[in-house]
Image (cartoon, grey):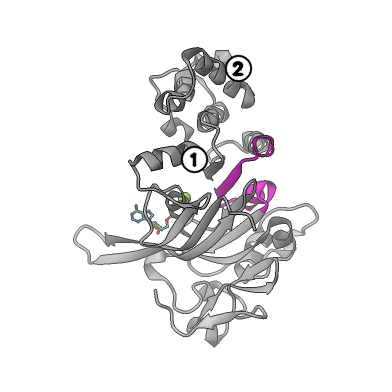
Amino acid sequence: MTTPQVEVQAISRTYRMRSGLFGRPISVRAVDNLSFSIQKGETLGIVGESGSGKSTTGRMVLGLEPPDQGSVHFDGAPIAAPGTAAWCAQRARMQMIFQDPLGALDRRLAVAAQIREPLDIHNIGTKAERDARVHELLRSVDLNDSHGARYPGALSGGQRQRIVLARALATKPDFLVCDEPVSALDVSIQAQVVNLLIDLQARLGLTMLFISHDLRVIRQISSKVAVMYLGRIVEFGDADDLFARPQHPYTQALVSASPAPGRRSSNRIVLTGDPPNPAARPSGCAFHPRCRHATARCAVEVPQLTAPDPQRQVACHLVAGASSQAQDAA
Ligand SMILES: Nc1ncnc2c1ncn2[C@@H]1O[C@H](COP(=O)(O)OP(=O)(O)OP(=O)(O)O)[C@@H](O)[C@H]1O
Ligand SMILES: [Mg+2]
């Protein structure tokens, strides 16, 4: 058995905040006892509605935020504490791309200099080698030196996200966390950037954690998929199989609402009830108030992730082989 590139074991993260200016302090459990691993060269897609804990998971995987409980290993070693030399070395091998490329770039600096920055920080190569690498990186994201000479404000949204991608690839990372990298782009541009990511992933053998609320994008890019609901994984499996045979009622609703060739819109499952709110987590199965199959048991017992077949994990009392925990600890 090879060491996974990334191994996440039972991580949790609770935020404490006030409800209103003088309100009572409340706890929001953003991520709750989450475990998964990503093999080298694999793309794990994380999908779920807003507030399901996707970004918090991404930050903990990169070591940008420590989990309250649990651990994250990268290539067999625990993620080092931020600011240490070990963390700096790890960070050169793990990069991230966020939703807003303009926010990630310095508006006062030509983009070539920004692609070069990680090479300067990590002291990689001579000046001439760095220049050559910037040229090569621009080409790898289908841009050229004339784009490199421009400032972020003179580029389109798609071009800016390509620059962010080129900068992320500068140190030849093994692992990329992409958090909604195309959500802010026009749909036609989204497809180009996703195709570029797929191409680069295959060419460079990258391992990826790809976060999105958009099932179409997740379906296109992922080899494995984790569906999150209120900080927990409710279903996990191989992407093609999961989309063809979703087993959790939440995944079934998401898949039915996502346009796909051959699926009739009359088959759409409409999710009723309030969207997930981590500050008011329902008892038992957190999805039960919106689940059309919920029984009395679902309101009191928390379903655990179990494997109805070897390729799939599902946390639902209605799926054969599911087990439960008597009372919600949240
Ligand atoms: N720094 C923080 N301080 C307080 N609460 C936070 C913080 N970060 C996240 N949260 C809360 O944790 C929960 C999960 O947030 P997170 O951003 O991880 O969700 P998400 O799935 O990425 O959502 P989205 O699709 O909107 O990006 C939310 O209720 C959010 O308000
Ligand atoms: Mg997010």
Q: Position of residue 34 (x, y in %)?
A: 49, 64
Q: Element type at marker 2?
A: loop
Label 2 or label 1, whichever comes before in sequence order: 1
Q: Position of residue 134 (x, y in %)?
A: 54, 20
Whether residue 173 appears in magenta in the rendering, the answer is no
Instruction: Say if residue 61 shows up in the picture.
Output: yes
The quarter holding residue 228 reads: bottom right
Look at the picture and state if 225 lies above or below 306.
above
Label placed on residue 302: none
Whether residue 211 appears in magenta in the rendering, the answer is yes
Is the C-beta of the residue carrying label 1 under 8 Å from the nearest atom of ligand 2?
no
* Residue displayed at 56% across by 36% down: 185
* Residue displayed at 47% across by 36% down: 92
For the N terminus, the image quarter is bottom right
Look at the picture and state if 64 lies above or below 138.
below
**Mark 1 lies on residue:** 96
Look at the picture and state if 212 lies above or below 152.
below
Q: Which residues are magenta?
A: 198-223
Q: Amino acid at mark 2?
A: Asn
**Mark 2 lies on residue:** 144
Instruction: Say if residue 275 shows up in the picture.
Output: no
Q: Amino acid at mark 1?
A: Met
